[in-house]
Image (cartoon, rainbow, N blue to C red):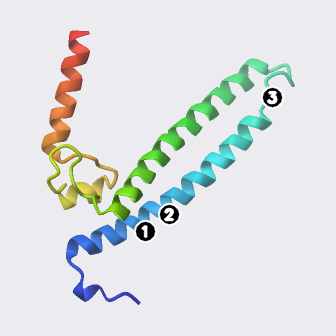
Amino acid sequence: MKNNARKTPRVVLYDRLQTELEEEFKDLQYRIDRTQRQILRADPMSTDHSEAIASDQEALIERCCHFRQRLKMIVRCLRRIREGTFGLCELCEEPIGQKRLEALPTARFCIGCQQEQERSEYEFQASA
């Protein structure tokens, strides 16, 4: 059993988040595999309801893409944990708040930098 008495609260949090992220990683891999099998089984040319099957297949493809995007975020977080950069804002390199990390372990930016990113994105879209 690990001795958490000597670990700082932030290290304990990171250990817990790492475990949760690893579990989510496994779950996403399973979901991707299952969804890919469902996509392959749905043959739009095999029945009279080919339009409905194609629509179902499209929804499965979108779901699989969503799972893959989430998996990439998880992999990035696990890599940052291993490298010792997890919990630091990717822009200003200041610590990301613990409450933010608990709520959103995949957060890449502190609140201030996240707001600035969103503001810049909004301004860019508004000018286009």
Tag 2: amino acid: Glu
Direction front: furthest residue: 83
The residue carrying mark 2 is 23
Relative horizontal placement of residue 3, taking residue 57 as reference (left or right): left
Tag 3: amino acid: Asp
Residues under numbered marks 3 and 1 in contact, where contact means CB atoms less than 8 Å apart: no
Which picture quadrant has residue 13? bottom left
The residue carrying mark 1 is 19
Crowdedness near tag 1: few (<14), some (14–19) or many (≥20) residues, C-alpha within 10 Å: few
Of 34 and 1, the residue lying toward us: 1
Relative horizontal placement of residue 94, taking residue 53 as reference (left or right): left
The quadrant of the image that shows the N terminus is: bottom left
Of 47 and 95, the residue lying toward us: 95
Q: Residue at x 22, y 70 (%)?
A: 10
Helix, strand or loop at mark 3: loop
Q: Nearer the viewer, mark 3 or mark 1?
A: 1
Q: Which of marks 3 and 2 is in front?
A: 2
CA distance separating discs 2 and 1:
6 Å
The percent position of residue 19, horizontal first and vertical second, equals: 43, 68
Q: Is residue 127 above or below residue 119?
A: above
Helix, strand or loop at mark 1: helix
CA distance separating discs 3 and 1:
38 Å
The quadrant of the image that shows the C terminus is: top left
Label drawn at residue 43: 3
The percent position of residue 23, horizontal first and vertical second, equals: 50, 63
Relative horizontal placement of residue 43, taking residue 5 as reference (left or right): right
Which picture quadrant has residue 30? bottom right
Helix, strand or loop at mark 2: helix
CA distance separating discs 3 and 2:
32 Å
